[in-house]
Image (cartoon, rainbow, N blue to C red):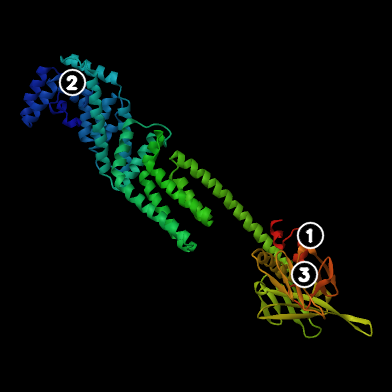
Amino acid sequence: MDLLQNPFHILTASPRDNRMRILELAEERSLLQDSSECINARSELTTPRKRLSAEIAWLPGVGPKKSDEVLSLLTSAPTVVLAIENIPATARANLLAAGLIRLPDCNAADVATWILEIAKAFEHIKFTELCASINEERVAAGFPKVSDTSTIEAEIQIRRAHYRNTIKSALDNLPPKELVKTVTNVIDVATHSGLEHGPTLIDDLVDLYEVGAQEFFEKEESNIKILVEKLREAVDAKCPDSMLAPLVDQLICVVKNWDIVAQPIQVSTKSRGLGHEASQRIAYLVRGLAIHMFNEHDKLDFSQQLTNMLQEVFAEVGEIAERTAQDACTLSALADQQVRTRESAKDKAEEWRQEISYEAEVGAIFKDKLLISPEGIEWKGYRWSLDSITKIRWGGTRHSINGIPTGTTYSVVFGNNSGNSTVSLRNKNIYSNFTDRLWRAVGVRLLIELFEGLSDGKQYRFGSAVLSDHGMELERKSFFSNTEHIFCRWSELAIWNGPGVFCIGKREDKGLSMGFSYIEEDNIHVLEAAIRTLWKKGGDRLSCIFTK
């Protein structure tokens, strides 16, 4: 019941008017307005049971003169009634509700202020004071007191529904975005950002709002599920980041849009110590995707984007906020670790570049540039990429005339099955520097590839000998019998160096040994390094070096 539709207002009566005065006023007013309306008003005010509704919907506790003043303001300048505070809570709530529906051109901020004041006034209604005020006026008017207090409680709940409907009507007049903004501001202020339980009418407002927004929530949740599934399928299909990024951005946008509407509900449930099931469903759906993208595909950046969004969007939902904060902390630590790893890798890459880079000029008169770097080896106008080289060998040959040493010629050969390049040198310093870099740049890689191949069961031939993980098959030649191929385990073998050769033989059989020329046979330096590493670390297989 609105103030200006109240029987007291229709008849211009006061709660202190007796039955006779009410009858007189009804007669007078029926001459000026609809007589049936006046008859109904008279009936409601003269029947004690019906009268209670009008009394509580009026201005209980406010004298006739003051009532006339505020009603005059309500019709002439409704915005002014907001400033009227020195009246009882029930009267103020009724006055504000009547003023809200009469506000001219109200904006979102104005509506929010009025809603908060109505909710505050209703919250301040004290049952005992209201009951005493009504009975005092009834005694003055000659009507029986209200003895059944439950009827007053029931009428208060009817007023509560009236305030709720009035607030809803005012909100429905706002554009959708302004409506959401207004409800969000109201809930935030009323609950101190979810830290305190808000007034009863604010809880009612949230419940009404949630019902009204249900269709939107269901539609957007469906869209979020579709996007999450698309992203999961795309990342599982190894789609490039350039394809994943727009999908992540779209998902973040949709979730944020969903949250704008859900925000007041989240804050309200937080203030009431409750959880918001829809928020939990959305949050754990997106969180599961973020975890999957990192754990299964190492997409740290995308996972961080989604987690940071969840932190922002669900800050008001306690359990989610706590869980996403832990996730964000973990991902941040991993990101820092990745940065350190990249920086360390960068430092190591620069260190490796410096270690393997070397440049020299070869030749007495017509000089050729010999260069090795991470970009490859340059020699006589041709560049070999380091990864393309699968064969290396080097060594020196001493020269003499009539037993008098005349110097040493050094040879370095590198290449692959398609061909090779040979560097002939006289300068020992250049030879030593270049072969040292060649070993670091290529030899170590070939050594690792050898170990990996042996671990996979591969065998490698060096001349007529066959290398396997568990040992080596050596060849025994004889003038008087057929050539024998004898397999020896590593525990049965010994190694040593001869002039320009690497030798392998059976410990208990001096006649079973083979020599491999460093300068004529490919990768003998790699073979020697592998066996000497086994000798140093121990074991019965070459590949066990990986696990030592």
Query: Which residue in the protein does label 1 denote?
Result: 536
Up-down: is 181 above or below 123?
below
Give the alpha-carbon distance from disc 2 to disc 3, as whole Å.
Answer: 110 Å
Residue 165 x, y percent position in the rendering:
24, 36
Pick whichever of labels 2 and 1 is earlier in the sequence: 2
Query: Helix, strand or loop at disc 1?
Result: helix
Q: Is residue 197 visible?
A: yes
Query: Helix, strand or loop at disc 3?
Result: helix
Query: Which mark, by number, is residue 436?
Result: 3
- Identify which amino acid the numbered label 3 is placed on: Asp
- Identify which amino acid the numbered label 1 is placed on: Lys
Residue 387 location, quadrant: bottom right
* Neighbour tally class for label 3: few under 14, some 14-19, many 20 plus, Cα within 10 Å: some
Residue 510 location, quadrant: bottom right
Q: Residue at the location (29% across, 41% down)?
A: 211
**Which one is in front in this view, the residue at disc 1 or the one at disc 3?**
1
Residue 17 x, y percent position in the rendering:
15, 18
Q: Is residue 62 visible?
A: no
Lateral position of residue 301 relative to residue 194, left or right:
right
Query: Which mark, by number, is residue 89?
Result: none
Query: Number of callouts in the render?
Result: 3
